[in-house]
């Protein structure tokens, strides 16, 4: 994967609404969602949703597929995995390591 592809993907995901859209599509899996379904689930206006889907599509993170009169957007898992691989390919300078995982953002913080 080229550095410019990574930059486009990270730039697209650097907006709260686009990140939420992408995560919703990842959760849904390959079946995808229509823009209308995304608008309802995420409470984002249709015109704004259209803009965000275009940005995610241009970054290669989502792909629309026509199903009759509807467009169904789904996450492009290969591209997403390519971005993750690029970011982690030299983790721990090539040593066998187990990355530290942060607690899920919805979990309560305990000290």
Image: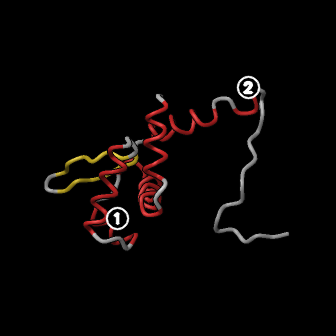
- Rendered-image quadrant of the C terminus: bottom right
In this view, the mark in front (2 or 1):
2
| Secondary element at image label 1 | helix
Q: Position of residue 53 (x, y in %)?
A: 32, 54
As drawn, 27 above or below 3: below
Residue projecting furthest to the left: 69
Numbered disc total: 2
**Apparent side of residue 42 relative to residue 85 in the rendered image (left or right):** left
Q: Residue furthest right?
A: 111
Q: For the residue carrying disc 1, how many other residues have a C-alpha within 10 Å: few (<14), some (14-19), or many (20+)?
A: many
Instruction: Give me the residue at 70% from left, 33% from top.
Output: 91
Under circle 2, the secondary element is helix
As drawn, 108 above or below 69: below
- Name the residue beneath numbered marker 1: 38
* Quarter assignment of residue 44: bottom left
The disc, 2 or 1, on the residue closer to the chain's N-terminal end is 1
Horizontal and vertical percent position of residue 31 = 35, 51
Question: For this view, does 17 lie left or right of residue 55?
Answer: right
The residue to which callout 2 is attached is 94
Task: State the CA–CA distance, disc 2 to disc 1.
Answer: 40 Å
Q: Which residue lies at the image location 37% right of the left edge and 74% below the top edge?
A: 43
């Amino acid at each position: 994967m080229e550095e410019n592809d990574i930059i486009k993907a990270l730039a697209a995901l650097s907006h709260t609404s686009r990140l939420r859209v992408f995560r919703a599509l990842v959760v849904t899996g390959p079946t995808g969602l229509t823009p209308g379904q995304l608008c309802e689930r995420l409470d984002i206006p249709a015109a704004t949703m259209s803009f965000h889907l275009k940005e995610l599509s241009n970054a290669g993170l989502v792909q629309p597929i026509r199903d009759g009169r509807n467009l169904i957007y789904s996450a492009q898992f290969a591209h997403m995995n390519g971005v993750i691989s690029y970011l982690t390919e030299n983790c721990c300078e090539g040593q066998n390591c187990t990355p530290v995982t942060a607690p899920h953002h919805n979990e309560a913080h305990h000290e």
